[in-house]
Amino acid sequence: MLPSLVAALLLAQAPAAAVPAPQPMPTGDALEKRIVANDARLFWGFFEGCDPDAVSDLIHPDFRMLHDLVGMPLSSGAQMIEQSRRNCADRAPGGKNEGYRNRRLPVPGSRRIQKLGDWGVPEEGHHTFHEWRASHEGGRGGWEMTGGGRYIHSWQWMPEEGRFRLLESLSIDHGPAVPYPPQTAARP
């Protein structure tokens, strides 16, 4: 009994593990750069790079996706990561979609980022989707634009983590890609 009492006293006197102090949400250019970098990392991990585990830290556990063509295909961060793992496994050698490649590109001039107090940021813009074609114009491989859409992402600031996590993705207006340059862009 005495050794356990001594152990309890020693534990009580041990310094507590340092808990990181909450960090303030970035503002101005730092905020915009962080969101743009997160967006690029997110879509690289889920599309062209096909490495969802490398970007899982960007996804909020309570993530959900709403999509104009299929409703609510994803209702948790874990579900999003797992679905992407399966899709990437299907692209791997021997998979049912072996060799499939796709990419998403934001339409320049269409992105809008707006701060919502200290809670987070909505990011809105247009993007285009592309698939690799082994036989393309001139007999060489190349990327073919297959469509486009509009997205609104809700990035929640996580002060204890010092980063944003994607809480919600609204993916709408899917169809033919929007013309480039976008009509809202200034023309020379």
Image (cartoon, rainbow, N blue to C red):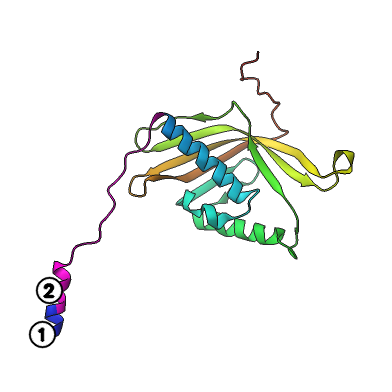
Can residue 76 be seen from the camera position used here?
no
Residue bounds of the magenta highlight: 7-28
For residue 123: magenta? no
Q: Residues within 10 Å of mark 1 (few under 14, many from 20)?
A: few
Determine the residue positioned at 59% across, 45% down: 43
Q: CA distance from mark 2 to mark 1?
A: 11 Å
Quarter of the rendering occupied by the N terminus: bottom left
Horizontal and vertical percent position of residue 11: 17, 71
Determine the residue positioned at 51% across, 54% down: 56
Dot 2 lies on which element?
A: helix
Residue nearest the viewer, comparing 29 with 165: 29
Q: Which mark is residue 2?
A: 1
Q: Which mark is residue 9?
A: 2
Give the left or right position of residue 87, taking residue 23 as reference: right
Q: Which mark is residue 17?
A: none
Say whether disc 2 or disc 1 marks the residue closer to the N-terminus: 1
Circles 2 and 1: CB atoms closer than 8 Å: no
Q: Give residue 53's quadrant in the image.
A: bottom right
Quarter of the rendering occupied by the C terminus: top right
For residue 17: magenta? yes
Horizontal and vertical percent position of residue 12: 15, 69
Horizontal and vertical percent position of residue 144: 77, 40
Dot 1 lies on which element?
A: helix
